[in-house]
Image (cartoon, rainbow, N blue to C red):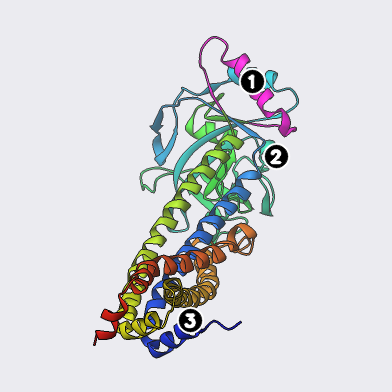
């Protein structure tokens, strides 16, 4: 059955089309802001989780290490670290799982005539391919070979055979040089503490020959073959190494994953809160339009009430109008969210793999529903005011 009050609402929107359109633009902006920011936050979480999940079987063991700056501009570990005895205790406590001792620092370097800075790792070449993947070239073979991360390779236009001078650019110092044997695949943020994208990896013997720290490591990673036994392995390390005093800190990648996921969830909520501000502005705009509509139609309201129209029907007429404005704004905003959201995710994250995943795309209908609800809430008071007018006073109004 046709609802005449809905038709009256449609007529009012058409008669004041420009005003209604401008009011709906606020809803469009609000829906786009909430949906796009929600999709950005979700894609960020999914992307980071995917990167981190690849290494959740890794246990990181480290010690509070005092840092000092050595010659040639390399920041390396002082003697406080994981010594050979502690490393042997770790190896005996983890059974057949892989144990990877790592030297770690930051270094300045020069490629051609261009200076740069990045991380530097010293490892046994046989350990490298246990958790890192070489995209181009080969693993370290010679004493002066090195692997570089894809970020360094791209930024400095490097290829296999390129030479890198390690250390601070200084005319009075003869700096050691390494040859690029291979370029690693992109890894992103790694929960195991080896962020190799912007790093140079050299043999552990080369690292200690130039920067000291032989048989003293900054970090030891244990790659657990059976992920279900990771807690058991951690407990075994703790019991063996920390039995008398707290010698090392033990942390698995899965705990870091949970912590980072929680942090990203908080960031997403904050981003959504910022986007919601635009809907508050839109609500004020819709409220203003609805009040103007009530004031302009006082006599029409008086006539409807005087011929026996119920107050609920008058309220419904104005709520219909608010609903129409909400549907228009939410519909346009939903379509805009797909385009703008995709662009934002692509620009900010550089990866749209997860854009159409349910966790991400659901923010579009969520944003649309919120936009419609905001319009209805904004129309409640104007609708109530219209339905409670005195018919005689309304008919006398000019």
| SS at mark 2 in the image | loop
Query: Which residue was labeled with disc 3?
Result: 5
Look at the image and give the residue range highlighted in magenta.
222-250
Image quarter for residue 397?
A: bottom left
Q: Would you say the residues marked 2 and 1 are in contact, meaning their CB atoms lie under 8 Å apart? A: no
| Real-space Cα separation, disc 2 to disc 1, in angstroms | 23 Å
Query: In this rendering, which labeled residue sits more in front, label 2 or label 1?
Result: 1
Distance in Å between CA atoms under marks 1 and 3: 71 Å
Residue, x 42% and y 37% (percent of image)? 75
Give the mark, 2 or 3, whose residue is nearer the N terminus. Answer: 3
Whether tag 2 and tag 3 are in contact, CB under 8 A, the answer is: no
Q: Where is residue 229 in the image (x, y as percent from the top left)?
A: 72, 28
Which residue is labeled 1 in the image? 235
The answer to which of marks 1 and 3 sits earlier in the sequence is: 3
Q: State the residue position of label 2.
A: 130
Mark 1 Cα shell of 10 Å, populated few (<14), some (14-19), many (≥20): some
- The one of 346 and 222 positioned closer to us in this rendering: 346
Residue 14 in view in this figure: yes
| Whole-percent x, y for residue 124 in the image | 64, 34
């Amino acid at each position: 059955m046709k609802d005449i009050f809905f038709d009256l609402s449609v007529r009012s929107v058409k008669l004041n089309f420009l005003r209604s359109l401008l009011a709906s633009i606020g809803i469009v902006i609000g829906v786009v802001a909430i949906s796009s920011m929600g999709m950005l936050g979700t894609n960020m979480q999914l992307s980071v989780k995917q990167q981190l999940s690849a290494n959740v079987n890794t246990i990181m063991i480290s010690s509070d290490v005092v840092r000092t700056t050595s010659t040639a501009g390399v920041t390396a570990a002082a003697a406080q670290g994981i010594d050979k005895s502690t490393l042997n205790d770790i190896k005996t406590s983890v059974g057949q799982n892989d144990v990877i001792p790592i030297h770690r620092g930051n270094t300045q370097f020069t490629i051609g005539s261009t200076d740069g800075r990045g991380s530097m790792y010293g490892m046994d070449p046989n350990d490298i391919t246990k958790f890192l993947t070489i995209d181009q070239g080969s693993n370290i073979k010679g004493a002066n070979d090195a692997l570089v991360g894809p970020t360094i390779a791209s930024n400095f236009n490097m290829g296999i055979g390129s030479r890198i001078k390690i250390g601070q650019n200084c005319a009075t110092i003869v700096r050691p040089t390494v040859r690029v044997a291979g370029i690693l695949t992109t890894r992103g943020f790694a929960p195991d503490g080896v962020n190799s994208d912007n790093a140079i990896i050299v043999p552990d013997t080369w690292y200690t020959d130039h920067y000291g720290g032989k048989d003293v490591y900054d970090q030891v990673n244990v790659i657990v073959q059976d992920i279900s036994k990771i807690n058991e392995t951690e407990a075994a390390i703790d019991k063996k190494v920390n039995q008398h005093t707290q010698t090392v800190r033990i942390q698995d990648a899965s705990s870091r994953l949970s912590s980072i996921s929680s942090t990203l969830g908080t960031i997403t909520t904050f981003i959504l809160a910022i986007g919601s501000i635009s809907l508050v502005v839109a609500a004020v705009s819709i409220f203003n339009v609805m009040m103007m509509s009530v004031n302009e139609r006082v006599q029409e309201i008086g006539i409807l009430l005087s011929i026996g129209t119920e107050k609920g029907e008058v309220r419904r007429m104005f709520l219909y109008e608010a609903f129409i404005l909400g549907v228009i704004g939410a519909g346009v905003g939903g379509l805009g969210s797909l385009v703008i959201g995709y662009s934002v995710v692509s620009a900010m994250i550089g990866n749209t793999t997860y854009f159409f995943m349910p966790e991400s795309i659901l923010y579009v209908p969520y944003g649309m529903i919120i936009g419609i609800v905001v319009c209805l809430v904004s129309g409640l008071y104007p609708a109530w005011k219209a339905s409670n007018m005195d018919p005689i006073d309304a008919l006398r109004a000019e």
